[in-house]
Structure formats: structure tokens, C-alpha cells
Image: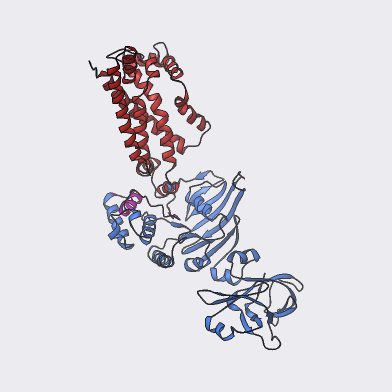
Amino acid sequence: MIRARLRKTFPARPDSASFSLDLEFQAAAGGTVLFGPSGAGKTLTLDLIAGFLRPDDGRILLDDEILFDGAAGVCLAPQARNCGYVFQNYALFPHMTLRQNLEFAAERRPRLERHRRVNEMLERFRLSDAAGRRPHEVSGGQRQRCSIARALIGAPRLLLFDEPAQGLDAPLRAEFYEVLRQVRTEFKTPMLLVTHDLDECFELGEEMLVVREGRLVQSGPPASILDQPANVDVARLLGVFNLIPAEIRALDPGRNTSKVQMGEYELDGPYFPGHLKGDRVTICTRPELLAARARNGRPGGNQIPAKLERAVEKPQGIRLEFAGGIAVDLGRSEYEQIRDAKEWLIEFPRESLRVL
Amino acid sequence: MQMDWFPLWLSLRVAFLSTAIAFAIGLWLAYILANREFRGKEVLDAAVTLPLVLPPTVLGYYLLVLLAGNSPLGRLWEHVFGSPLVFTWKAAVMAALLHALPLLVKSARAALESVDRSLERAARNLGASEWRLFWRVTLPLARRSIFAAVALAFARSLGDFGVTLMVAGNIPGRTQTLAVAIYDAVEAGNTAVARTLVLIISAVALLILTLANRWSPR
């Protein structure tokens, strides 16, 4: 369990604007993902926890130990923090074999135990055959497993991952997720991961911390954040929503209904707590929850006519892009049935509507 | 032609010693410059580099003032070793050191700074002390550039003329290094000896620089 309150400011430089980080969060057992765009301060957060940089102020508590306390002037050296760090480029020592890399990390243990421990880790991470080779002589997957084994060999109380799957091809990425699941069940070390990939948040995170410009903007399980982003900024960061300006025309908590005006059309939605009639809002819907139909006759309930601009092939199906920036995802067979339509309707299922 | 091989051996001995001393001091200075942040850091770097650009007479003058028998350092030397430093072959080592040190510090600092910072962070993260990090990670990764720098420093120490002349003098059989002997031979019209020594020193320098190139990381 890690609890952190971090403050760090970088003044403006000729080549960079000023940046300030002001974060407070905790991460318990399992996987916690720091999600945000590049430049949000995610890697900086890991570096502050690992002790590579010193926060201006704040407090870092790992289990019961104080790693940093600005007020008390406590700042443990990185060597004393016992946080495993898996670097983006793995940072394996290029002049050492994989075995020597692990031995380096286990050097503080007694000789006999060290030897046993190194062998055990090599075996667990399927590296025994490559143990005598250097990092540049082994495959990407082996390098990756070696860097995780090296981080784990000192029995850290926390594992930090900096964009671990960045730049990996699909098979390696799948293998990596598999290894991490194994680590989670076998070692039970809490993990804090940095990523800007939403899929990865769902793969690896029980908890998700959305960070933007050095501030925490939302936290919670990934599924609930996807279901109800806290505001338009978060929705934009997640990057998977249709965001449409609208106005609330009616709200009825008793019957759990509402009416929202979108352009010249009115849609029925569920009751939106915390909003008032007349509020200008942004409707937030996911493309895969919407439906597209061929238009014949008048639009039905919650259907609006729209002009199709493009149909884009995606691995999962077809994405239809309509005028006004509304996207609808369809399965291939669904699309085949209506692909020749001249005029289109977009259907907004009542329960798919969220307002921000 | 009567060849006296003493200048060659003296020059080699001077170069070996000054390179060894420059290596020890230079590596330490380079480490400080590459890893520590302190006021006057770039001034220190510039001061170390100074011998590369100052005229030999200026350097010789400094050394004389610094090491002469009536200076504090000179007195300390005499007190410890029982004889003065200036106008001995040991002063020639000091002269050569002045040239070897900047080359070593400059290249070693660049070499140490070029080692991937994430590797150093990884080592610290894995519990390695700064000492172990330096000897086991940074130095091995920078060793090719540092070997090359040592070779360059050695070649440079072999060839000093002006400073050596000022602080060690030109005493045949005692302080006369190769470069000084060549000057002497030319002055005395002894062209055969001069030619031989010139060819030898050129060949040795060429060999060393070739090795240095081979060691440099590509």
C-alpha cells in the first residue's frame, strides 16, 4: 500500500514551459494505473516515488515506512526505498549477461541464497536457456521478462512500471500482460503502472488514476470511469466518446426520465442527478452503444437523421462517421445489411446517454 | 652515428608515470564533474582545460613558481623526498602531467556523461551504492572511450617540449627527454640522430593513436 502526496514545480526554461505537479493518491494491492496524456507528469510521479528526484513538498508512505516527508526533511535514497522499477527501455545492463543482471540486483543477499534465488527467478521467468547471453543477444520478450525478474528479485514492496508495453507488437504485448498476471498471482506485489493506452488500463488496472497537467482529475475502477467520466476533459482524454452539446429540457427523478435537446431534436434519457432543467451540457455516448439505421419515413423515438461522411474499416468492425462529429461502431454483418442506404438515422438508446 | 637511447627510455618512463597519475586524478575529477552539481563547476572544468590552450612558457612559469625550492610545495617535496623537484626527471613528469590531465578529464567526463542515465537509475534502484554503480556499471560502459583517452594522454605526454625544458632543463643523461634531445641534435647539426629520433617518436605516436581509434566506440 502506497500513499503519496507529491508537489514538484519546474520553472519555465527556454526550451520548456513551466510545469507543476500536485497529486495525492493511494494505491493498494493489485494493479493501479496512472493514465494520462504525455506530459501529464506520470513518469515524474514514478521518479519521485523511486527517489530519482526529490519532491518540493509532500509525503510518501510505503506500507508503514516514510520514504519522503517534506516537512520533517526525510528523503530516503533510491537504494533504500525497495521499490522495483521496470523502465520503459528495460534498462538492462548491456555489458552483463541476463544472469549477471539478476545477480547484480541480488548482491545484498548472502552468496548461497543469492545463487538459489537467481536460478529460481531465471526458471520462473523462462530465462534459463538465455541466462548466459547479453541483452542484445536475446529476444524482446526475454529482455522484458528479465527486467521484471530483476526488479522482483529483491522482493520489493512495490513495483513501478513506466509505459511497459510502449512500442511492443501485439504478440509481445499479449505475452507481457500474461507475465504480469502471473506476477500478480505469484508475488502479490502491488503495482503502479504508467500508461496512455486505455486498453492497458483495463488489462492491468483494478484502479485507475486519470492525470492531466499534473493534477488528478478522476480515480476509480476503469469500467466505472469509462461508464461515467467526471467531466468533459476526462472524456476527451479517454478518447472514446461522442461529445455533443445539448440542453436539458426536462428532468423527472420519480420516473427516472429526462429530455435533452440536441440541435432541433429531442432525446429521451434517464434521470441525470446533479443537473437542473435548462443546464447546457455535453452528451457523452460511446460509439458502440449507438445504432445506425437506413432511413425510411419519419425518424422514430431517439432517432435523428444524419449525413454519413465516411465508413472506416476497423479491426473490430466498421466505424461510421457522421456530420457533426458523431461516430457509430457497427459489426461487419450489421453494416452489410444497411450499407446501401441513401439516408441515415442515428439511434441513441435511452440508457446509453450520459451528460457531463 | 653514436646513438644515445637514454632520451627514448626517459620519455617512455615519463609518459607512463604521468599517464598513470593523470588517470587517477583525471578519473576522479571527471566523476565529480559528471555527477555532482556545485558552484564553480564549469570554472573547474575550464581551469583543468587551460593547459591545452596556454603557451608552454606560461605553463612552465606556473610550474616553476609552484614547485621551486622556495615555494611551499617545493619545500614540502624536499622535506618528504630529501631533494628538490625542479631540474630532475620527476619535474618532467609534472610537465607531461599538465598536458595529459586535460585530455583525460575532458574525454572521461564526456564518456561518463554519455552512459545512459536510466542504467544508473536502475542500478541505484536495485540497491547499488554509488561506489558499486561507478565500478560495475558506469566505468565498464564508458571504458572504451576512457581507454582511448588514456592512449591519447600517453601520446601527448610523450611529446612535451617547452614545459619540460623550463622545469626539468636539458641535462643529458638526467632530464633530457626525446623532444629535447631532438632539439639538441638539430642545434648541434647532428641530423642523423635527429632524423632517427623524429622517426621513432612519430612511429610510436602513430601506433598509439591507431590503437586509440580502434578502442573508441563506433
Q: Residue furthest left?
A: B2
Please provide percent x and percent y for residue B59. Answer: 44, 19
The quadrant of the picture occupied by the C terminus of chain B is: top left
Q: Per the image, is A324 magenta?
A: no
Q: In the rendered image, is residue A256 in sight?
A: no
- Residue displayed at 53% across by 81% down: A332
**Is A136 located above or below residue A248 in the figure?**
above
Magenta-colored span: A82-110
- Residue displayed at 47% across by 54% down: A64
**Is A235 located above or below residue A20 in the figure?**
below
According to the rendering, which colour does chain B have? Answer: red
According to the rendering, which colour does chain A have? Answer: blue
Please provide percent x and percent y for residue A102. Answer: 33, 53
Q: Is residue B149 left or right of residue A131?
A: right
- Residue displayed at 35% across by 26% down: B157
**Is A194 located above or below residue A260 in the figure?**
above
Please provide percent x and percent y for residue B80. Answer: 33, 16
Q: Residue furthest bottom?
A: A297
Residue B100 occupies which quadrant of the picture?
top left
Residue A35 occupies which quadrant of the picture?
bottom right
